[in-house]
């Protein structure tokens, strides 16, 4: 299965059912069973009713534009086919009051005739009906009947907005005509639409100048990126001249996803549009969004319209129609200065008078450096054999800070904070971040006046909280937690180091449950101690010896 | 080119640039040049700041959720990769005031650690920071660290809404934890994502239980339609039990497009979701919409959460975040009775006393029936050789109405209206609708007290207006317009018929410009008269002879 599609016959009924179940719309119960959707809260007495429709497969057009400030009724035909006259007439009857009705018709023969006859018949019934024909396609400059494309949505918005404001039918129709006359649309697609039950037509490649019924484009297009594609479309729209011509007020642009673009592609295309045409001529941008699609056609269209006051007022007005995409006002990217750090980690931490603690930490660092190859080997079964190298890098960084007099323990909290920063940048990888998390929490606890055992406990808790591992998962915690318990129980560093060593040894019988090692088969690590746990034990052991 | 993608390195910067140019967001100017986006109008003094982020490629997550009632800052990493600690820390610093900050973190090791360390460091700077870990994936039931998926967006909404309402950090964090604990998400895709510059992995088919980083799904899936696909997802979610369990309040569902579904597919999937789970258990539906995508992955995920009061209040609240999709309240499809027709076209029109007009119209109909084969032949070059058959069908229908006494000209307007309805249904195709448009307008003009020549003119004008053709386009108009001018000039029916005949003859030298014939090469129709124009001429000629 290539798509989440039912059969071709079922597609439109299912799409309409979804809308009827989720949007504030109702279906007319007509004698002929034709499909007509109306706004649930539309009041025919309230003003001019704007009605549109046409073949389906262009969702959210047209039923998605039912709502306050847009359409009062939508007449969906079957897939890519005009709705019958009777359906259009029922729609007009259902929503038209004394103020009358405007039919917005895309310029296809079927729509023009069926909506046209429905209008004539509605007039015969005493209803005041006008029609406006949308012909925004510029792909075929010599054709006498340009197609109606995504620009239609702007006409829905202008007419719907004016109708909601209480405009007369004369006003609404005139505004729709003015808007319709000013819009130009051009499309480009990489691949055509796939009809339900059919294979995608692999003979068609990228094409410029497409309609919305999967008919071939005006010509094939050579495009190597979004930049090319947008350039072709803007050139075909004569966008530069249009921008110059309407330089004062600018343009309203619609970037329409024809149905198959990812959100990322839409944004990349928007950046091209804004970059190539410039931000200044673009008073508003609507999209990137699927507004007038052609099933899953992998392409886009750009619509440009002069940014008249009436168009700006309309596109800026809110609407309850779920298919509408709010207009944005493009601008240059804005930046703001970052905040200042209040705790400067780079401050030198003064050394203790006797330098004994500093010397002990250097011993611990030396023990880790000495164990580089042993720890790398332990890591080979579970990871990429770099545990020793990673711990040694952290050890070396701390050793160098102490050696150069930049790190001393006269202020223990400041010292541990300095170590945290150093480990974060020097070690890299998960273990560096985890030790930095631990040390940062230790430093904070010390600063808060907590004892070393309490601070150690707080550090391990932070590590567990953010790392997500528990004791027995074959991680550093299997050495850290026994050591912490020894300290908490009143033991000294030697007891803590012994407990860490025992914990590390016990990891040989454990299965990895956290970190990257969790993804390797159990047998691969069987019998070997966890490199992180061993590193913790070696460090504590050296520290304890030095401070004995 | 398969996608509108720049290079892999450029994708994220271009996506962010588009957002910065179109949304109310600003980029932090950081010393390290990391990417941090903040709400342009966020005031750190106003309350709790909600911050989220993670790898890019999930747009609109997370920068699309910047806005009032959702996020204050977003930290986008590179494609599918966690952002650095420094970026998260800068984000926290930029938006956090006295009320503190909540970090919403998707449960991936990188995010957990980098956001975790940033939180620790921010605390060190005196900022009040909490974290909540989102782990809504149910694809891998035995895993200890479930992934964070589309359910994350509900947590953004709940936390952002509560923060906007002035909630304390305790309240906001607790609500986020509660929401996070209740959500379940399951995904299914037909095809995986395509990374920029890479080919789509053709070895992967439909899969169930996907994450959002294009890793393989929990298992491959056999699906033959949207129904199957939704059934698999709902079964994996244990949706039925969940619905029963929360029967009273119901559930909130999120239907997330993973990036590659067309709008139509989204609606088809929504219908399946509502159909299979039933409308009753679903208090709200968010989507179908791309909310947490995986580039162009052609698939969807469903998230279910208990519809707590706090969740309902949050999803119903408006937000200025452009990526959010408003919640709808699913219901049964609603219908309303269609309006009554005020002009009943089926009313019998009484016959004139002498029956002369009726007889003349029957003569015209007979002439058309007699010309069936001749007109079909004329149409062969330009269309599908059915013009004669079509006109004959209309002629026969009118003839039968007169023969059965249902159509008479005692009330000419009523008679022509009756003919209009008859032609519309009996003829079909463009010519039937065009003649129905013409007759309907004629009838209305007669009703308004206009003379026959005036009414005829009004009919032709309506036909031109809706049909879009002009004289010389090789259509019925090339006979109708000369006839109309003859009548308007004071001539009788014989003059009109003669003018129509001359007009029809002249079409042999014309190129088709309207209707289907406009799409066939000029040479194909050269020398042959237009079938429609000839039909008009034949009818008028017979009518004139009968009324002479």
Image: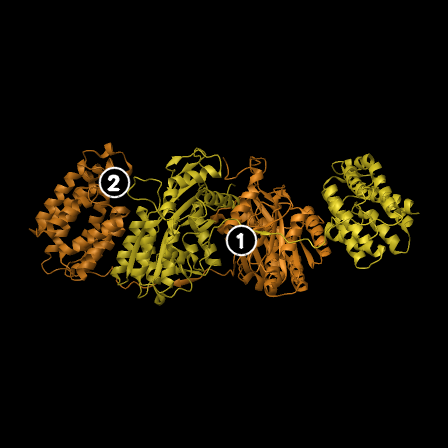
Chain colours: A orange, B yellow
Q: Is residue B376 left or right of residue A459?
A: right
Q: Residue furthest bottom?
A: B45
> Rounded to the nearest whole Å, what is the CA distance between mark 1 and mark 2?
47 Å
In front here: B434 or B380? B434
Chain letter of the residue carrying label 2: A
Q: Is residue A331 left or right of residue B451?
A: left
Q: Nearer the viewer, mark 1 or mark 2?
A: 1
In front here: A490 or B458? B458
**Residue B510 at x, y percent in the picture:** 81, 44
Q: Quadrant of residue A281?
A: bottom right
Q: Secondary structure at mark 2?
A: loop
Q: Quadrant of residue A454?
A: bottom left
Tag of residue A323: 1
Q: Is residue A222 left or right of residue A338?
A: right
CB of mark 1 within 8 Å of CB of mark 2? no
Chain letter of the residue carrying label 1: A
* Dot 1 or dot 2, earlier in sequence: 1
Q: Residues within 10 Å of mark 1 (few under 14, many from 20)?
A: many
**Residue B528 at x, y percent in the picture:** 82, 38
Q: Residue furthest right?
A: B548
Q: Residues within 10 Å of mark 2 (few under 14, many from 20)?
A: many
Residue A157 in view here: yes
Q: Which residue is mark 2?
A: A513
**Residue A127 at x, y percent in the picture:** 69, 58
Residue B211 in view here: no
């Amino acid at each position: 299965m290539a798509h989440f599609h039912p059969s071709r016959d079922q597609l439109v009924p299912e799409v309409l059912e979804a809308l009827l179940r989720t949007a504030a719309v109702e279906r007319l119960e007509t004698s002929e069973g034709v499909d007509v959707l109306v706004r649930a809260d539309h009041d025919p007495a309230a003003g001019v009713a704007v009605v549109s429709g046409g073949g389906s497969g262009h969702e959210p057009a047209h039923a998605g534009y039912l709502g306050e400030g847009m359409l009062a009724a939508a007449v969906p035909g079957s897939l890519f086919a005009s709705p019958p006259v009777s359906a259009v007439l029922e729609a007009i009857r259902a929503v038209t009051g004394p103020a009358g009705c405007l039919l917005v018709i895309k310029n296809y023969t079927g729509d023009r005739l069926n909506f046209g006859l429905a209008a004539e018949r509605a007039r015969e019934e005493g209803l005041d009906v006008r029609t406006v024909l949308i012909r925004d396609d510029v792909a075929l400059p010599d054709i006498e009947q340009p197609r109606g494309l995504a620009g239609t949505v702007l006409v829905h918005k202008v007419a719907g907005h004016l109708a909601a404001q209480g405009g007369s039918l004369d006003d609404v129709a005139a505004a729709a005509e003015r808007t319709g006359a000013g819009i130009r649309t051009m499309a480009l697609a990489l691949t055509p639409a796939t009809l339900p039950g059919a294979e995608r037509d692999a003979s068609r490649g990228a094409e410029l100048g497409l309609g919305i019924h999967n008919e071939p484009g005006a010509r094939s297009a050579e495009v190597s990126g979004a930049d090319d594609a947008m350039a072709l479309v803007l050139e075909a729209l004569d966008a530069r001249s249009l921008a110059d011509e309407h330089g004062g007020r600018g343009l309203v642009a619609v970037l329409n996803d024809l149905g198959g673009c990812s959100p990322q592609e839409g944004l990349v295309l928007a950046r091209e549009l804004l970059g190539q045409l410039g931000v200044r001529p673009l008073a508003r941008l609507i999209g990137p969004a699927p507004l007038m699609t052609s099933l899953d056609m992998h392409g886009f269209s750009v619509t440009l319209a002069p940014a008249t006051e009436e168009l700006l007022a309309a596109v800026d007005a809110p609407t309850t129609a779920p298919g509408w995409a709010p207009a944005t006002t493009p601008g240059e990217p804005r930046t703001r200065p970052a905040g200042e750090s209040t705790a400067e980690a780079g401050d030198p931490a003064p050394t203790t008078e006797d330098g004994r603690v500093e010397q002990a930490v250097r011993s611990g660092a030396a023990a880790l450096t000495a164990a580089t190859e042993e720890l790398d080997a332990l890591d080979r079964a579970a990871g990429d054999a770099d545990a020793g190298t990673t711990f040694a890098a952290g050890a070396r960084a701390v050793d160098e800070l102490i050696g150069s007099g930049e790190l001393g323990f006269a202020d223990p909290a400041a010292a541990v904070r300095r170590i945290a920063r150093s480990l974060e940048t020097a070690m890299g990888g998960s273990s560096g971040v985890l030790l930095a998390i631990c040390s940062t929490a230790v430093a904070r606890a010390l600063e808060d006046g907590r004892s070393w055992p309490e601070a150690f406990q707080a550090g391990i808790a932070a590590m567990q909280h953010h790392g997500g591992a528990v004791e027995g998962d074959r991680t550093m915690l299997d050495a850290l937690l026994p050591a912490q318990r020894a300290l908490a129980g009143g033991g000294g560093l030697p007891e803590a180091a012994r407990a860490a060593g025992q914990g590390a040894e016990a990891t040989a019988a454990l299965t990895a449950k956290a970190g990257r090692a969790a993804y390797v088969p159990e047998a691969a690590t069987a019998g070997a101690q966890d490199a992180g746990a061993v590193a913790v034990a070696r460090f504590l052991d050296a520290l304890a010896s030095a401070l004995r």
